[in-house]
Amino acid sequence: MTNKKKKKWLIAAAIIAGIIIFLNIPIVSDVIAVGRVGMLYDVVDVSKADYDGESRYLFVFDKIEGYEKYEPTFCYVTENNIFRSTVWIVEPATGIAQYYTKPTIGHPYIGETVHFTPGEIPG
C-alpha cells in the first residue's frame, strides 16, 4: 500500500472513531432516541434530574392547553440501539405513563401503561 492510501485509511478510521465516540455521548444518544420516536419537535426543555432512582435527561414538553395547573409532560430514554428506541413518557395532566417504542423497521407501539392520580408524578 502506498503512503497516500495508508493516509486515507487512517483518516477514514479516525473519522469513524470520532463519530462513534460522539454518538455515544449520553445527551446526544438521548436526543437521537427522542427524535427517532418522533417527539423532539414538542420539547421545550432538557434537564438532568434524578428520576426513578437514576440520573437521567428529562425531555420536558410544552404544557397542554387547558392543563396549565399540572406539571408538564416529560419523557426519558430507556432504550436506544440499532433495533429500537424506547422512551418512558409521563403525562401528569392525564394520569398516564407508558413506554413508547419505535423499532427501526415497523410501526411504533405502546408497551406497559401505568395509570396514576392526575396531578401526581409516578416514580
Image (cartoon, rainbow, N blue to C red):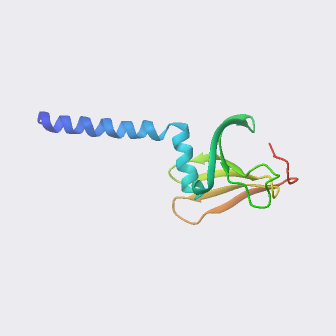
Q: Quadrant of the N terminus?
A: top left
Which residue is the extreme one toward the bottom? 107
Q: Quadrant of residue 3?
A: top left
Residue drawn where x is 61% and y is 47% of the image: 79
Q: Does residue 65 sit above or below 76 in this rendering?
A: below
Rendered location of residue 70, percent (x, y): 81, 51
Q: Does residue 30 sit above or below 64 in this rendering?
A: above
- Asked if residue 7 lies left or right of residue 66, the reply is left
Rendered location of residue 90, percent (x, y): 74, 51
Of 103 and 34, the residue lying toward us: 34
Residue drawn where x is 55% and y is 39% of the image: 27
- Asked if residue 120 lies left or right of residue 75, the reply is right
Q: Quadrant of residue 14?
A: top left
Rendered location of residue 81, percent (x, y): 53, 48
Rendered location of residue 88, percent (x, y): 69, 50
Residue drawn where x is 55% and y is 54% of the image: 35
Of 48 and 12, the residue lying toward us: 48
Q: Give the total of numbered labels.
A: 0
Which residue is the extreme one toward the left? 2
Q: Quadrant of the C terminus?
A: top right
- Asked if residue 3 lies left or right of residue 86, the reply is left
